[in-house]
Amino acid sequence: MIKQIDFLDIPLDILTMNETINKIDEAVSSNKQVHHCVINAGKVVKIQNNKRLKESVINSDIINADGMGIVWAVRFLGYKIQERVAGIDLMENLIRLAHEKNYNCFFLGAKEAVVKNVVNYYSLKYSKKMIAGFRNGYFEEEDEKDIIKNIKKSDADFLFVAISSPKKEILLNKYKDELKNINLIMGVGGSFDVVAGTVKRAPKYMQDIGLEWFYRFVQEPKRMWKRYLIGNLKFVILIFKAKFFSSVN
């Protein structure tokens, strides 16, 4: 089975959750760095008009299909893909792996109260020893270098960054060479809010049928309507163009 495809000029890895975890585990065991990224319909739409975001995404070592919209689109374009690899689920699995193998994690992002709740949650669930450090995600560009220095000094093995796109992707791509001592650098979007209980995640059945976005929209319609309703329409148009008007496919 093909393990990577060209999906709208994005080198998308056709991996299952277990394959992704194993690939990251092997790299960490070999003391190599893995820059991980996920894509959903919204991010693919943003990439079309944001060169820095596109560069940051395609420079990642592993790119997974986060949303069911991506999975359906990949199948529509004629490729086989077994499942989505949701960023929050992968993060949860990797934090469990970190606990099992005595790796340390740094958490960057969200509001101060939220990231503290995330750290407390994993400290109680696993161990305080696995917490290398944390910081909220509200900072200016001039603060970035000091933040990166502190992350390097923390001796973390895994770095999880819960900041909105395109800021988190650009930040990780910009500083990943300076973070070579960290084996996994990964953007996790709004995952901290879900773990902290600030935002409710859709029930499993809604996730499975691709309506997780609608559940989020219902919770925050004023903030999410443009991203989901207009963004999803633009994504569908991109896929139809790739299917019927692209010589590449």
Image: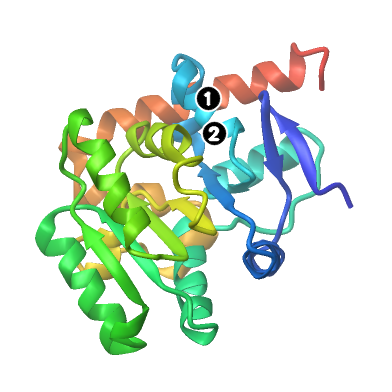
233 on left or right of 133: right
Q: Quadrant of residue 246?
A: top right
Query: Please, what is the three-letter code of the amino acid marked with disc 1?
Result: Lys
Crowding near pointer 2: few (<14 within 10 Å), some, many (20+)? many
How many numbered circles does the render carry? 2
Which label belongs to residue 54?
1
Asked whether, in this view, residue 173 is left or right of residue 15, the answer is: left
Q: Which residue is mark 2?
A: 57
Marks 1 and 2 sit apart, C-alpha to C-alpha, by: 5 Å
Query: Is the C-beta separation of discs 1 and 2 under 8 Å?
Result: yes
Callout 1 secondary element: helix
Task: Give the side of residue 147 with respect to residue 27, left or right.
Answer: left
At x 45% / y 71%, what residue is drawn?
92
Residue 54 placement (x, y as % from top left): 52, 24
Q: Say if 114 sits above or below 123 in the image.
A: above
Q: Which residue is at 74% across, 30% downward?
A: 6
**Horizontal and vertical percent position of residue 184:** 52, 57
Q: Quadrant of residue 201?
A: bottom left
Rendered residue at 33%/33% (across/down): 167
Q: Position of residue 199 (x, y in %)?
A: 22, 60
Q: Which mark is residue 208?
A: none
Q: Residues within 10 Å of mark 1 (few under 14, many from 20)?
A: many
Under mark 2, the amino acid is Val
Q: Nearer the viewer, residue 92 or 52?
A: 52
Q: Going by the picture, which residue comes out furthest to the right? A: 1
Q: Determine whether the residue tagged by mark 2 lies in a helix, strand or loop.
A: helix
